[in-house]
Image (cartoon, rainbow, N blue to C red):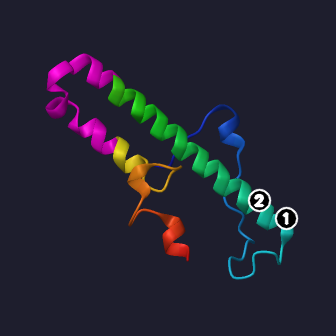
């Protein structure tokens, strides 16, 4: 099943079809559209991580001392969502894109 977006998000274009990663500046309009697409996708990942973080915080408040056992799935989902998103301590090491690009 494909993602369905509503409101303004329904009108956002996807990645441009004429963008060539080997020569990104061949078509400058496609390069800018690609950059906007990448930034938009990163922002979606950041907001998803924020929502998951709020879910973890609520679970910790509700469960009290049993949060280690009862919030394990929420914490795993949150930690998985922050890999390669923003600047977090969990991105240091194998998940750090800056290290891979050097």
Q: Is residue 75 magenta?
A: yes
Q: Which residue is mark 1?
A: 29
Q: Secondary structure at mark 2?
A: helix
Tell me where residue 65 appears, x and y as whole percent.
Answer: 16, 22
Residue 91 left/right relative to 13: left
Relative horizontal placement of residue 68, taking residue 42 as reference (left or right): left
Span of residues in magenta = 58-77
How far across and down, in percent of the image, does residue 10 sit? 66, 40
Please determine whether, in this image, residue 5 is positioned above or below residue 29: above
- Check contact, mark 2 vs mark 1: CB within 8 A: yes
Work out how far the residue at label 2 is from the one at label 1, CA to CA, in angstroms. Answer: 6 Å
Dominant SS in magenta: helix
Residue at horizontal 65%, vertical 48%?
A: 40
Q: Residue at x 67, y 61 (%)?
A: 15
State the mark number for residue 6.
Answer: none
Q: Residue at x 27, y 24 (%)?
A: 60
In this rendered view, identify the residue nearer to me: 29 or 55: 55
Identity of the residue drawn at 75% across and 72% down:
18
**Residue 73 highlighted magenta (yes or no):** yes
Q: Quadrant of the C terminus?
A: bottom right
The percent position of residue 77, horizontal first and vertical second, equals 33, 43
Q: Secondary structure at mark 1?
A: helix
- Which is nearer the eye, 44 or 13? 44
Q: Nearer the viewer, residue 86 or 33?
A: 86
Category of crowding for the residue at label 2, using alpha-carbon neighbours closer than 10 angstroms: few (below 14), some (14–19), many (at least 20): some
Where does the image place residue 29, in percent across and percent down from the top left? 85, 64
User: Which disc is residue 33 wearing?
Assistant: 2
């Amino acid at each position: 099943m494909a993602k369905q977006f509503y409101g303004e998000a329904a009108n956002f274009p996807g990645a441009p079809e004429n963008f060539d990663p080997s020569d990104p500046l061949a078509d400058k309009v496609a390069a800018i559209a690609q950059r906007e697409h990448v930034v938009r996708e990163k922002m979606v990942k950041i907001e998803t991580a924020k929502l998951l973080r709020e879910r973890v915080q609520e679970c910790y408040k509700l469960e009290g001392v049993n949060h280690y056992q009862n919030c394990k799935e929420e914490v795993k989902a949150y930690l998985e969502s922050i890999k390669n998103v923003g600047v977090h301590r969990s991105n240091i090491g194998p998940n750090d894109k800056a290290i891979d690009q050097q």
